[in-house]
Image (cartoon, rainbow, N blue to C red):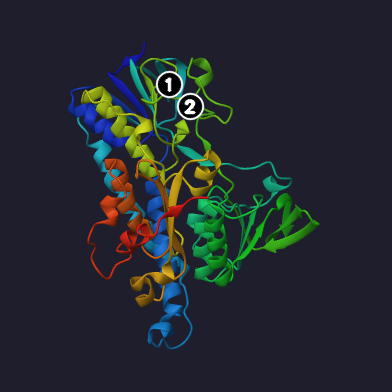
Amino acid sequence: MATRFDAIIIGTGQAGPPLAGRLTKAGRRVAIIERRRFGGTCVNYGCTPTKALVASARAAHMARRAADFGVAIEGSVRVDMAKVKARKDQIAGRSNESITAYIKDMDNSVVFQEHAVFVADKRLRVGNETIEADTIFINVGARAAIPPIEGLGQVPYLTNCSILDLATLPESVVILGGGYVGVEFGQMYQRFGSEVTIVDRAPRLMSSEDEDVSKEIRKIFENEGIEVITGAKVEAVARDGDGIRLTLSDGDGRRTIAGSHFLVAAGRKPNTDDLGLETTAIEVDDKGYIRVDDYLRTSVDGVFALGDCNGRGAFTHTSYNDYEIVAANLLDGDDRKVSDRFTAYAAYIDPPFARVGASETELRKAGRKALIARMPMSGVARAREMSETQGFMKIMVDAPTSRILGAQMIGTRCDEVIHCVLYVMYTGAPYTAIERSMPIHPNVAELLPTMLKQLEPLE
């Protein structure tokens, strides 16, 4: 006999808890299922702990740069990884405790700390119980993808999760992957004091971004002492004493590199392979992502997929926006869709990289009639005053309508500056809404109007 609920939520990542709160307040009895830590990736393995580590790494970096600002520090800068980890654990722990209390104290809900498996379209086995509902929300997230490399199963490799447990500083770290996870951990550990090598099969770092972005990030990294190897495939991994040895192949043949630790940051994989979806009519693509429409509905009526597992975004903010879309349509009588939102994200390297909307490469490929403006960070007074002049900003505008199509920025505070552009894009206003504004001086964002006065045809 199955226990019946009004709704079932599988997973407590960023979309799950607020959705449960809305549903229970609307009088619906909800089953909330979580097999690991409440809060999902962001709170436990992603944004919260990693950005705490990034802050510690920046503190070490700025301490080494103290003389640039006329500040004398006696002796060398030493990083105590045990204390760095303790700080990170405290910050992430408070977030986990908060979301755990919120979920467990929620009225009109039942919490299952078990693994859920579908046994039919609207029925699940959770531990020793069977539950069912007409409305089900799948919010199971994703995990590190582990590539099929010879010998990988015989070496102690790290992932974005297990590296968070390190309480001692690695002598050297080899990182497989030059995407967002790889570059953040790479710069972080170089600043902590490890020797870092990043290996990527793609021809450049952050290969999904414009070439000028990739080149700038590589320059920043190499200036800090990070070795970057692109266009190389890892053929095999083996133990090398207490460390590891990688065999690489590229256009020049084979070679080996070694390190004390090996971080695999070669992409993500949705947590859908052990959900029992084969017992349902819920469709997945060839990578395991659950297929959804513009309203996040799956191929089974009443079943929705939110967050990383639907392949429509791999960030905390896209997951939370998934919740907002579903809640608006089901509870508010509103009409919100995935297609309403613009691509937007940041990589929390230092200086940070941020993007919204279309890239320059995409616009050129589409043959779009567009305008473009660029500004080096060396042209920003606030950046010069902070002695942080690495990077640039660029913004693209649709020539016929004057609406902003996208922006990419790498520079101090650009993870915040990008929102000036993002918000104007959502209003549908022309770029002149920024260009004719009077910003506050001195600031990084104040150069956006100046930059937009320099628009030129994208050729």
Q: Nearer the viewer, residue 167 or 150?
A: 150
Q: Residue at x 29, y 29 (%)?
A: 336
Q: In which quarter of the image is residue 38?
A: top left
Q: In which quarter of the image is the N terminus?
A: top left
- Residue 362, percent from left and from top: 52, 43
Judge left or right: residue 159 versus residue 405: right
Q: Which residue is drawn at 30% across and 21% down?
A: 7
In the foreground, 380 or 222:
380
Q: Mark 1 points at which residue?
A: 298
Indicate the secondary structure of the residue bearing disc 1: loop
Q: Is residue 349 above or below residue 398?
A: below
Viewer-side residue, 10 vs 36: 10
Q: What element carries label 2?
A: loop
Residue 15 in view of the camera? no
Q: Where is residue 229 in the image (x, y as percent from the top left)?
A: 66, 59
Q: Name the residue that disc number 2 marks.
A: 290
x 36%, y 57%: residue: 452
Amino acid type shown at disc 1: Thr
Q: In this view, does 69 lie to the left or right of 172?
A: left
